[in-house]
Amino acid sequence: MNIGEIWAYREKPRTPGAPARRVEIVKIHPSKKKIAQVRYLDGEDEDFAEWVPMVRLVAPWPEIELILDDKRRFQAARAASEHAFETLEHRAAHYAARGYLQLRSHRLSYGCPARDGATVEVEDVQGLARDLGFDQHELLSASLAFIDRNGTYFGPWEIALRIARRICELMPDVVLAGGVAREDQLRHQAVYGYRHDHKTYTVEAPLEYCKERLLKEQPTFNLVRAWCGFPAERFDELLALREEFDRMTRLVEKAIEKLNSYGHSVAARNLQAELGAIVRTRVPVKVP
């Protein structure tokens, strides 16, 4: 952005369909780098100059029609995809995209929820078509799909879902690796809760909240498994707790051995007695 250039000014730059006006860049603020003085070139306040945030200067005026055309086409794809936003399949598609990005450097995105809904964004559609065995023409000719002025491909939910499922079919191991890691993390939190200590504060999540979060996400993990050709898995909280009980019992038994080996027999007997009382109250669990 330079003084004297003609830019498109939008008072509400993030509002779809907001009008754009021609302005001339008069000054760049010397200390506030994100503010510029502009002069209006048309309308009732023609020749009027004022300081405005640079975020409202959306593009050089010669490019504005291309930008607005991209926005109109994207809004059409987004509107046709809203029904799928935050559905089970949409959440599963995010795991597929993350798996693909583990193997490829070009961008594949299922969007920022507040802005993109359930559309798909592909930086290199030719590379993606080659990787996944798609006919590139088929992707480009799909209803509401388009390539913007920067060469980025955008597709509606219909295409987004096909891409996600194909990734799972061809790259199941890498997709499941990411999904299982997240699932294991949520399962651990469902048993122990969540706590993270920062330097100046601590973040904690109650156990019930962690359990609810796992219950909400479990169908997503099961759908990803199904897309990858694997059966669903069931998380049994009671069995997980009993497994942890057995692990802690083994640790205490090792501690008793150490106490005896160092001559602390009284402490070892007391600990053994307490452990025995706890173990006797343990109720067997039948594994289905």
Image (cartoon, rainbow, N blue to C red):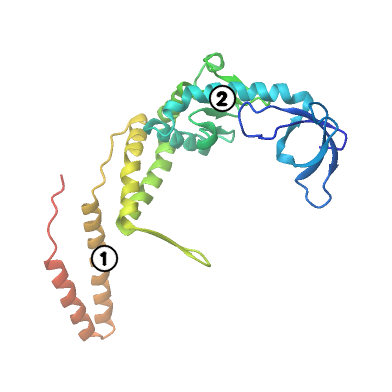
Decide: is 168 above or below 69: below
Q: Please tell me in which quadrant of the rendered image residue 89 appears.
A: top left
Q: Amino acid at mark 2?
A: Gln
Q: Quadrant of the N terminus?
A: top right
Residue drawn at (49%, 65%), measured in percent from left and top? Answer: 201
Instruction: Give above or below for 273 relative to 281.
Output: below
Which circle, 2 or 1, is nearer the viewer?
2
Element carrying mark 1? helix
* Residue 6 percent coordinates (x, y): 82, 30
Task: Quadrant for residue 27, please give it.
Answer: top right
Gap in angstroms between the C-alphas marked 2 and 1: 55 Å
Q: Residues within 10 Å of mark 1 (few under 14, many from 20)?
A: few
Q: Which residue is mark 1?
A: 248
Contact flag, marks 2 and 1 (Cβ < 8 Å): no
Total marks placed:
2
Q: Depth check: 142 or 60 in front?
A: 60
Query: Mark 2 highlights which residue?
Result: 75
At label 1, the amino acid type is Met
**In this picture, residue 19 sits left or right of residue 88:** right
Which is nearer the eye, 219 or 205? 205
User: Could you say where residue 198 lies in the image, as x and y percent from the top left?
Assistant: 50, 64
When asked about the image quadrant of residue 272, the answer is: bottom left
Which one is in front, 61 or 157? 61
Residue 205: % across, % down: 38, 57
**Relative to 273, residue 28 above or below:** above
The quadrant of the image that shows the C terminus is top left
Q: Secondary structure at mark 2?
A: helix
First of labels 2, 1 by sequence position:
2
